[in-house]
Every structure is written in structure tokens, then in C-alpha cells.
Image (cartoon, rainbow, N blue to C red):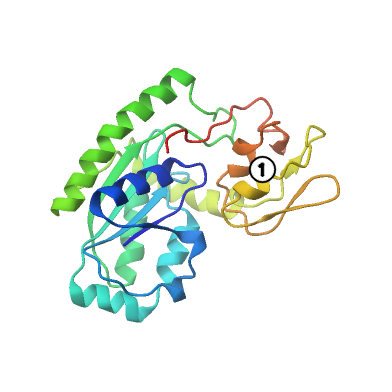
Amino acid sequence: MIFYFSGLGNTKYVAKEIGAAIFETPRFIPDYLPEAVEDETTESVGFLFPIYSWGVPPIVLDFIKRLPEKLVNNWREKELPVWTVCTYGDETGGAIDILRKALKKRGLRLQGAWSVRMPNTYVLLPGFDVDPKEIEKEKLSEAKGRISEIARKIKDGCWEDDYHTGSFPALRTKLIFPLFVKYGINAKKWHHTNACVKCGRCIKACPVNNISMGETGPLWGEDCTSCLACFHNCPYHAVEYGKITKNKGQYVCPLK
């Protein structure tokens, strides 16, 4: 079984490629109520997600927390390997440790963990922007081989820890990630500019259906995951986060 979260397509692409290699259909976490996930014949359980400020997207942690005990018990009884693959722009920090602890609370042991470097998408802080096109192209090219390697190891049951933490991972994750969760995941500063033509692309792109169309343009609800899909998918660059996203670049994974 493969569960994944993705806002801009990087992790979705990885999940799709690994799923095809191990004959599993990836499940998009926002589309599944954890309580409704049923047990199925499978050889392993995988969780895929993008790095959020050196941490794990809260929507993924909440999903794991709410998985039905009966299902988790079956996984434990069958001794199914649990693994993860995260996508990152520069480094993963201590995100895998966060996931490991979340799984341990459910009685599950993380046996394999990998990371795949993909183009940067975060633009909500000064100095943060998408990659130049040449770096984007380089990352996407390298990712294909990396994904194939990981898929082969999962298929063969070659469990290992192979992910790029970067410098001072524990410090960054312990200090910055909690602040990001508390202050960085909200929709209060999202708004549309006069360039908005009410095309609805932002509504369609939102993975948690948090955007609706108002009289003058999109309106954001309270369930934002800070995936930035609304910003990056707007063809008119009419979606902004305060003033911080002005003149920032846009990116949506071109791989299918």
C-alpha cells in the first residue's frame, strides 16, 4: 500500500513511478479518510511526502495518527515492512525522525527511508524562490535514476536509510518546523489581485478543497496545508501571499 501527499506534483510523480514498479496503486491522502482505509493484500506499506520546513506535512502525520487500530494491528501481525520516500529541494533535516516517532506511536517500525531531490517550490519567505530553469532541469533528470534505484530496493526488500539530512538537521527541525506549523500553515495572507479572471485554476489545484469562488475571485478557507498549489498553478500570477510572493517564480512538476 502506498499513501502520498503532493501539492505540486513532485511527490505524486515519485509515488506513481514507484507504484508502477512494485505493482501498487498510490493513494492520495486527502482523498481518504483514515478511518475508511481497508486492509488489502500487500507486501509493504509506504508513506511519501514533500519536506515541509525540515519536517513532515501535518496532514500526513494526522493521517497516520488516525489510521484505524484494526488495520495497524493487521500490519503488525503480518510484519509488513514500512518505508518512506520524501522529496526535498535542498535537504530533509530531521523529517524522517519525526515520521519514525509518529509510526512508533502506532507500534510500527520504519524499515526503509529514502529521499529524492526535486525542484524547490517554497516561496513564502524572503530569499526563498523556485530554482533557475537549468537547476530545475538537472534535478528532474537526476531524479529519474534515483527513483528507479529506490523502487528496485523496495521491490527486493533491501531496506536502508538513505536520505540527505543536510547541516544541523536536528537543530533546524526542532526550532523551525514547530514555528512553521504554528505560524506558516494558514490562509490569512492569501488573496487575489486585480489580475484575477476567475478562471478557477486555483480551486481545481487545491488538494484539500479549501478554496471557493467569490464575487471578485477566490476565497480561502481554514483548511490550508500551505502546499502553494494555488500560487504556482495560477496562469495570471494573480494569487499572492501578502507581499512576499510578488515577483517570485512558479513551478509545477512537468513529469507525468
Residue at the image position 36 percent from the left and 47 percent from the top:
16
Task: Specify whether 96 is left or right of 216.
Answer: left
Residue at the image position 42 percent from the left and 70 percent from the top:
65
Task: Specify whether 156 is left or right of 69.
Answer: left
Residue behind mark 1: 201
Quadrant into which the N terminus falls: bottom left
Q: Residues within 10 Å of mark 1 (few under 14, many from 20)?
A: some
State the image coordinates of residue 14 (x, y, percent, origin top left).
Answer: 36, 44
Residue 159 visible somewhere in the drawing: no
State the image coordinates of residue 173 (x, y, percent, origin top left).
Answer: 41, 47
Residue 123 visible somewhere in the drawing: yes
> Foreground residue, 45 or 53?
45
61 versus 251 height, above or below: below
> Foreground residue, 26 or 95?
26
Q: Amino acid at mark 1?
A: Arg
Residue at the image position 48 percent from the left and 46 percent from the top:
176
Task: Specify whether 171 is left or right of 237.
Answer: left
State the image coordinates of residue 206 (x, y, percent, origin top left).
Answer: 61, 50
State the image coordinates of residue 188 (x, y, percent, origin top left).
Answer: 71, 50
Residue at the image position 47 percent from the left and 46 percent from the top:
52
Quadrant into which the C terminus falls: top left
